Image (cartoon, rainbow, N blue to C red):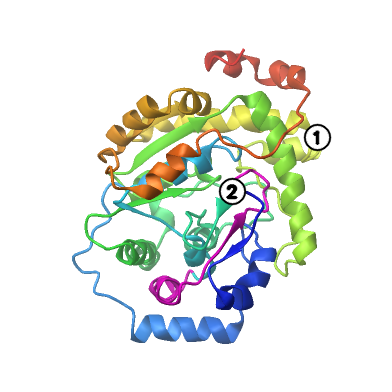
Amino acid sequence: MAGQVQYANWWSKLLFGKAYDNQFVIPLPNPRGLTALMEFCERNFLTPDFTRLKIEKPVFIVGLPRSGTSLLYNLLCAHERAAYVTTSINCFPTAVCTIEWARKKFNFNIRGERFLQDSIDADFSSPSEPAMFWGKWIGRDTDSLYWPEKRLKDFSPEKIEEIYGDIKRVLHSFGGEGRRFIVKYPVFQTELRMLQDLFPDAKFVHIVRDGRQVANSLVKLYKLCNDQIQKINHPDLKALVPYPRVKNLEKYVKEFGATDIRTTAHIWEDSIEAVHEAKGDLKHFTEIRYEDLLGRPESELKRIFEFVELPWPAASNELFKKEYANIGVIHHRNSYGQFDVVERIAGKTLKAYGYA
């Protein structure tokens, strides 16, 4: 149940209890000695031969935070052929195989509600946003509110091989050949052409939710993230604007403020516009509304699985059954308002999606 913390064993609580209390989308730095040990093991004992391993048809879930991306991500990652960045892997991006081996070998695990207060429980094996990998691969500045578009020409051959190599490590950790890499991250709206460059056979799934709800929820997200930064005294972050870097983000923040509903209403509309501007350059693209996923989950998921070229999960897949049963289950209440403001700013797009 959301809100209750469960430890797999005494060692998990002793070694990782503080890490759970200090959770954040960009994890706190690990102790240098631990990182050095993990990297030593990765180099010398747990680096497999990737020569024949291929990254085939990776799946990118695109959508604003608070739009149902985590719900869809968890459902797709529950497939028996899925491979993804786990919470543990995101904390040790330079020792992927080692941390997954150690987690499974010693049953390290803590399960509880995320600090985001969104009724979603997570543990060390849960799908995670690849925040640490994105910084490692792409080099984006979290303090900047504008990110110029990057394309294949902006990456050295060595950096491209590093990206592919890290993903192959994830695939290997889930069984290797035949696994499909699935990932979601809130910044993808402005990075789609770059992803298409890097992964020509990629599948893109865009999830959209009622902008009136999302605009309110983004304000809540901003406050939760920045309260957590202060609570854990994050050494690398003093503040964070957890919104995609749409072209006018800096303008909106300066004009209205990061927690103003006018800012988040514009962000909702501009994010959808950014996806639609890029989708003509994407070879495989589909869209789903969060409300339709809740209202008719079986038919919508069958459509999505068919699109990404995965069969319906096996009858024996207990993880998928659990995630499917959680569709629409929440343990919190939101008190949202100012819908009229959102409608004035994004009325045309709301209407196009059937929200107004």
Label 1, label 2: how far apart the Cα atoms are: 19 Å
Q: Which residue is denoted by mark 2 in the rendering?
A: 147
Q: Residues within 10 Å of mark 1 (few under 14, many from 20)?
A: few
Dot 1: element: helix
Residue in the image at 48% along x and 49% along y: 150
141, 307: nearer the viewer: 307
Indicate the quadrant containing the C terminus: top left, top right, bottom left or bottom right: top right
| Amino acid at pointer 2 | Trp
Give the labeled residue for mark 1.
255
Residue 312 shows in this picture: yes
**Is any atom of residue 283 visible in this view?**
no
Give the residues drawn in magenta, as a range.
93-120
User: Toward which corner of the image does residue 302 lie, by quadrant?
Assistant: top left
Tell me, yes or no, whether the highlighted magenta stretch contains residue 331. Answer: no
Going by the image, does 313 lie left or right of 68? Answer: left
Residue sitting nearer the eye, 256 or 106: 106
